[in-house]
Amino acid sequence: MASIKDVAKKAGVAASTVSKVLNNYPNVSEETKKKVEDAIRELNFIPNAAAAALSSKQTGRIALLINEKEQSQAIDEIDMQYLTGSIVRAREKHMDVQTIFFSMLKEKTYEDMVNYLRAQSIEGLVIFGLSKNDTEIMRLINSKMFKCVCVDAPVVSETASTVWVDQYKAQYDIAKEMLLHNPAKSILYLAGKKNSFVMEGRLKAINDIAKEQGITLKVEQGDFSEKKARKITLKLGRKYDLIMCASDMMAIGAMLALTDLDIFRPVAGFDGITLMGYAGKKMTTVKQDFKEIARAAIDEAESLLLGNPGKETIMPHKIVRIEYLDVIH
């Protein structure tokens, strides 16, 4: 395992200079910084605190990267469950964790991110909410300098794992369940963000079941937004027999729009958040156990830090109907 002296020798600088680069000291030239960063990548250097933890067979420090939803119309229950599950599981395993929000890295270059994480002896990342647009974070994952677990993103390699539900099966299951109890000739489907990894499987599933059953399908971009879902449903709700949504927040928006229109249409969501129980109607949704998903992600981070290769972990889901009485008991 490379030491700080090995990095200094490779870069042709003093060990103190390497330390300054790792700790983001301002008085280091860009040329020197680049030499040190190149040496770090080439030698796959891990700071001493992290190296000591690994050599004693104890897993080191990990960061929870949370992609907070800045435009959410309500407190993000999902992120809170992720955080709770992760922190409790890490405590059980005596793992040191810290929370970093995507917004904290927004203005940082790839090199800045590497230095920021290494300065804090971060060895592993558990990433919640990664999208295809997060190119700099993808560079972090692909660099293999950190052990990474991606929740809801299919990134698997020697140093990266994914933990999520089977997106295709979950969407297919709820669509089949809805059509069994609500025969329909047409479906309005409110999709999430185009750059979302989870939408690939969900869109394929809803298209497949529509073709299988000869149903007219209209896909609209709701971007996981309650507000956008409400607006789309106000415009198109009367024209379709069934409304399927790629998130519970959009299902709530759609249901509120139907109330304003004074019409009934069956509405289905995806996630199983408690807030669904306050929408005023009983709604069907895909229930994910976000705390258990987070716990599994911490387990997988530990496995990676102990030298095991990355893998895909599929978590269970179930179809449930949620109403007010369910959330107050």
Image: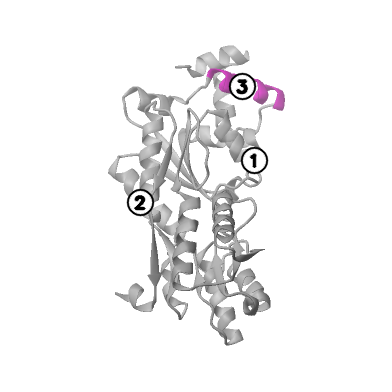
Residue 138 visible in the current orientation: yes
Q: Mark 2 to mark 1: distance in Å? A: 28 Å
- According to the picture, the residue beneath numbered tag 1 turns out to be 135
First along the sequence among labels 1 and 3 = 3
- According to the picture, the residue beneath numbered tag 2 turns out to be 292
Q: Which amino acid does label 1 sit on?
A: Thr
Magenta span of residues: 30-43
State the residue in front, 211 or 109: 211
SS state under label 3: helix
Residue drawn where x is 57% and y is 29% of the image: 143
Is the residue marked by circle 2 packed among few (<14), some (14-19), or many (20+) residues within 10 Å?
some
Q: Mark 3 to mark 2: distance in Å? A: 40 Å
Mark number, residue 38: none
Please give left or right for residue 128 compared with residue 293 in the image. right
Q: What residue type is labelled 2?
A: Glu
Is the residue marked by circle 3 packed among few (<14), some (14-19), or many (20+) residues within 10 Å?
many
Q: Residue 102: percent from the left, percent from the top?
A: 57, 49
State the residue in front, 72 or 43: 72
